[in-house]
Each structure stands twice: as structure tokens, then as C-alpha cells.
Amino acid sequence: MKTETTRKIILTTLSIFSAFVVLRHEIMNLNKTEWFIFDTYETLFWYGLGLLIAIPTTINAVKSYKRSNSKAYFVPVIILGLATILNIGLRFVQTENDSPVILWAHYDGDTNGLTLKLREDKTYKLENYSILGGDFIEGNYRLEDDTIYMDRKEPIGNDFMNDKLVITKDKVLFHLDENGEYETGFFSMRIIEKN
């Protein structure tokens, strides 16, 4: 009898741990504003660990139920089932803004880059990245003639780009040179889409 109780506790604990490692990873990524080149491997590790624990736990709980007919062995299976449903739900929550893009521009600096998307609902998304990773900056903008006014003084956290951008025929100018003039050459974003 004592062995049965211990088995139930161990299987329930393992199912909670398996659910915790995967759900914790998904919740941490829910509002993530940055990415790193090895993020996929981290995700594979946590899902792999979760499955490595969940599969034998489920098999053992089902076998133990068949042997003893104790409904307490359903607890680990229910925990893992609910965690799976919650995990799928979290995946659907992670949706991108579906407002139409009115301007999409990109700067390619070889080992780094900058992408800007302006949406019809007056929101913007900047991706500032290098070959190892990057971050996403989101906010609101105001458009007056050929000038974009962003809601952050230095959107990417340094003086490389300020809150005022200028749209030309085929570029978005964002970088000021040493004279305070907009750089029209290398440090400008090429317009990919404009509506």
C-alpha cells in the first residue's frame, strides 16, 4: 500500500514538473522583445525534457491504473493533458498585429540590420538585429507629410536613430551625420513596400 502511494506521488510530481518546464518556457516567450540565434535549440531542449518526462510518466500511470484500478493514477494524465491544452492555447495567443502594413523599409549593414514596419493603425515595429540576435521595438507613430514621428526619443536605445524619420522616393532616412543632416547613402533604409 505504501508503495502505491509513493508511486502516485512520484508520477504526479513528474507530471507537474514536465508541465512546468514547457509552460514556463512558453510563458517566458509570450511577450519576448528579443531573439538570439540559439533560441530554437533552447525551445527544443525544454520540449524534449518535457516529453522525456511526460511519455514514461503517462505510460507508467496507465499501466498502474490497469493493475490497481485506482483513479488516482488519472491525476498525472489529467495534469499533462491540461498542460498540453494550455500550451496550445498560448501558441494561439502569440499573434502578430494584423493591421495592414503601409510602409516597410530595411537597412542592411551586412552583419547587422534594421527593419521598420508602419501599420495602418498607427503602430510601428522595428527589428534591430545582428547575426547573433536582435530585439523588437513596438510603439506608435504620427505621420506628417514625409516625416514619421515615433513615440520614443531613441527607439533602438542609442543615438544611431532618433524619433524623427524622413521618407523619400525610395528610402527612409533615419541617421544624422556629424553635421546634423540626414544620411542619404549607406545609413538609410531602402523602401520594400509602400501603400
Image: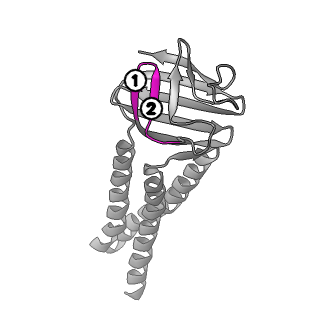
- In the image: residue 98, left or right of residue 147: left
> Helix, strand or loop at disc 2?
strand
Answer with mark 2 or mark 1, whichever residue precedes in sequence. 1
Q: Please state which of residues 170 and 30 is positioned toward the viewer in this rendering.
A: 170
Query: Which label sits on residue 63?
Result: none
- Vertically, is 178 above or below 146? below
Is 182 rendered above or below residue 32?
above
| Percent coordinates x, y for residue 90 in the rendering | 37, 49
- Residue at x 72%, y 29% (from the top left corner): 110
Q: Amino acid at mark 2?
A: Tyr
Q: Which residues are magenta?
A: 141-153
Q: Assess disc 1: are there few (<14), some (14-19) or many (≥20) residues with their C-alpha within 10 Å of its C-alpha.
A: few
148 magenta-colored:
yes
The picture quadrant where one finds residue 134 is top right
User: Between 68 and 103, which is closer to the camera in this rendering?
Assistant: 103
Left or right of 28, for residue 86: left
Disc 2 and disc 1 in contact, CB within 8 angstroms: yes
Q: Which mark is residue 149?
A: 2
Viewport quadrant of the N terminus: bottom left
As drawn, which residue projects farthest toward the front?
179
